[in-house]
Amino acid sequence: MHSGAEGWLGHTTPSIGTSEVKLNRLNAFNSPARPYSTASQREERLPFTVRVVTTPQDLAKAVEVRASAYARHLPTLGPALRSPEAEDLQPDVLVLLAERKLDGQPIGSLRLQSNVRRPLRLQGEAPLLQSFSANRLVESTRLGVGAGPASKIVTATLIKAAYEVCRGAEIDYNVIGGRRSMVPVFRSMQFDELEGGPFPISFGNNIPHWIFVLPIREFEARLERAKHWYYEYFARTDHPDIEIDWAYVLSAFEYA
Amino acid sequence: MTTGTGIVRWQSTVDPTRCGLELAGYFADQHRLEAELDKGLGKSSVTRPAFVFTSPGSTRAEDIASAVTRAADFSSDARMCVALDAEALCATDSVVLRKANVGILLDHVDADTPLSIITTDLIEAVRFDETFLRRAYVDSRSACVLAAMLGLAHDLGLATLGSVDEANSNGEFAFDYVVIPAFD
């Protein structure tokens, strides 16, 4: 774990993934503009917040819900996820956390890794991904939602936050891998399937995964064309409960 | 659960270190309410409540607005919430609710509660009506309604509260919080 600066952004505890780069950029960023081509038509409050993890306490919550969610689908992997993974602590990694307002219960998390400092882990698993290596990429992993069946709104809000993070940091493509059960989900979200799959993922117990790529700048238009309900939820609805710490995000993804 | 006065403790079914307090029947008397809250917090010295809620016990808009203001004025680490049933929620000016940093718990949810009310964006939790729950434990169609409502609440990210009779529910219905009867 990196040692964080005391009092940085109000945190008195060590920050996760803090680096000199992040600290040096704090005074040199502007919050990105709203990343949608259409005006918002409504504001909607949520019973939970979604934010970027910046403290060990937040990370512990994200790990808690991730382990719980994975234990349902992959019982053998669940116990191994009860502690933070090495990836969680890397400075080019962001973890998003959904937390219930009522009681602070974590109800969802998602991890984002950029390729600004090193290749994505998936790039070593699928040769075709190498053709994207000149682009700014973010890999979404470890989506975990709730103790019961995955909540549609929590999932959608985590993905909306991830999209806004990617747009704000001018990421070109989002890359995601999933088991067979996730294939229709990614297709419905207008991701492009990488040819040659499924790919056995070495860091996923060699379970075959399908890999998908999404051009971030096309996401909104694709959702609109497909008449996906995410379009209204993303582009036409403001969610003030998505709280993105842009200083943290932009320094993690080395956006200047 | 909301008749009379008293403190009711709600225990998380996921995390035993999390609990909430219901202060029943005190909203007409601000001083007694604060005293009871102090009493409740004192008894929860080991497990601090994550949330505290109470019901205004009225469907009059001005009573509800007053209850929301009082809840907003409390200084507490716990999330302050006001419990409103569907009728009271509909009678309330949403601007009042949006202005206050107070959570809304939809109360007395049963088979007659419109789903559109449950999806109202200001709601953070739902509490199911005890009579409805007792019926759902023995009646298959009511059980289906309850299961659907729990699924909806879960999809929306809402917390669910239910006073569960374990012997009758067979663990079929998973609430986020269940009542612990004897807190005093």
Image (cartoon, coloured by chain):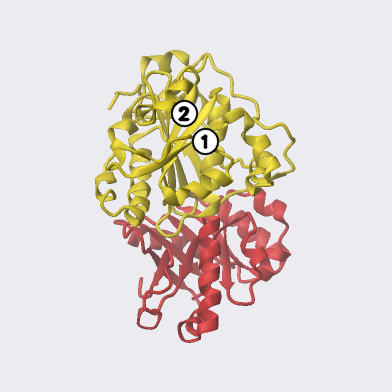
- Which residue is at a point 36% across and 64% down the rendered structure image? B13
Q: Residues within 10 Å of mark 1 (few under 14, many from 20)?
A: many
At label 1, which amino acid type do we have?
A: Ala
The residue sitting at the bottom extreme is B138
Instruction: Provide residue B150's location: percent of width, then percent of height.
Output: 51, 67
SS under mark 2: strand
Dots 1 and 2: beta carbons under 8 Å? yes
**Residue B34's spot in the image, x, y percent?**
49, 60
Say which residue appears at 40% left-offset and 57% top-offset: A147
Colour in which chain B is drawn: red
Say if B91 sits above or below A147 in the image: below
Per the image, the residue denoted by label 2 is A138
Task: Kindly identify the residue that appears in the image at 48 percent across and 83 percent down.
Answer: B134
Chain letter behind tag 2:
A
Q: Which residue is mark 1?
A: A162
Q: Position of residue A24 (x, y in %)?
A: 43, 13
Q: Tell me the colour chain A is drawn in.
A: yellow
Q: Quadrant of residue A160?
A: top right
